[in-house]
Amino acid sequence: MPVDFSGTWNLISNDNFEGYMVTLGIDFATRKIAKMLKPQKVIKQDGDSFYIHTTSTFRDYSLQFKIGEEFEEDNKGLDNRKCKSVVTWENDKLVCVQTGEKKNRGWTHWLEGDDLHLELRCENQVCKQVFKRA
Ligand code: 1AG
């Protein structure tokens, strides 16, 4: 049985979100608001199809993909850049490579105990987020 990320998840920690946002060129005022947020993620996993909806009081972001199928990602409401993204399994981890203007951009999701982990990478910055089941 593959890992199942499905569920509703609430952010409990957010390490170096600031550094990640700075490399993406997010302005000071937006970063100040974004840092205060406690986003919620709703993940629906159906075989190799994923739907990940991240919501907050400020901005929402939704993503739909199939494992191994490259798609055009429009980071609307985030840094507004477009990139070509592909998500693959690396053992039990979900690894996304976001190819575009920014080097070394991507993220990894995995489960650890009852928690959902997310590492967001851009250039030399790594943001580490942890979520608990709602
Ligand atoms: C995400 O990607 C995207 C959601 O988790 C937020 C993560 C990082 C934010 C990216 C850049 C910061 C830009 C602007 C800050 C403004 C608002 C922040 C809003 C945060 C809630 C949407 C991985 C994901 C897979 O798609 O889980």
Image (cartoon, grey):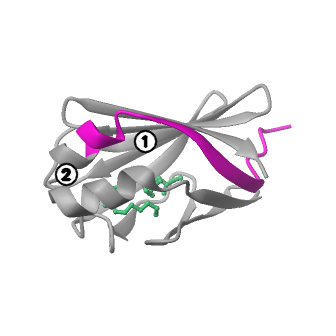
Give the CA separation, mark 1 to mark 2: 14 Å
Q: Is residue 115 left or right of residue 102?
A: right
Q: Position of residue 100 (x, y in %)?
A: 19, 55
Location of residue 88 with respect to 85 vertically, above or below: above
Q: Quadrant of the N terminus?
A: top right
The residue depicted at 35 percent of the width and 60 percent of the height is 33
Q: Which mark is residue 78?
A: none
Q: Is residue 114 left or right of residue 27?
A: right
Mark 1 residue CB less than 8 A from any atom of ligand 1: yes
Q: Is residue 66 left or right of residue 98?
A: right
Residue at the disc numbered 1: 107
| Residue type highlighted by circle 2 | Leu
Q: 83 and 53: which one is in front?
A: 53
Q: Secondary structure at mark 2?
A: loop
Residue at the disc numbered 2: 24
| Residue type highlighted by circle 1 | Trp
Q: Position of residue 41 (x, y in %)?
A: 63, 58
Q: Magenta span covers which residues?
A: 1-20
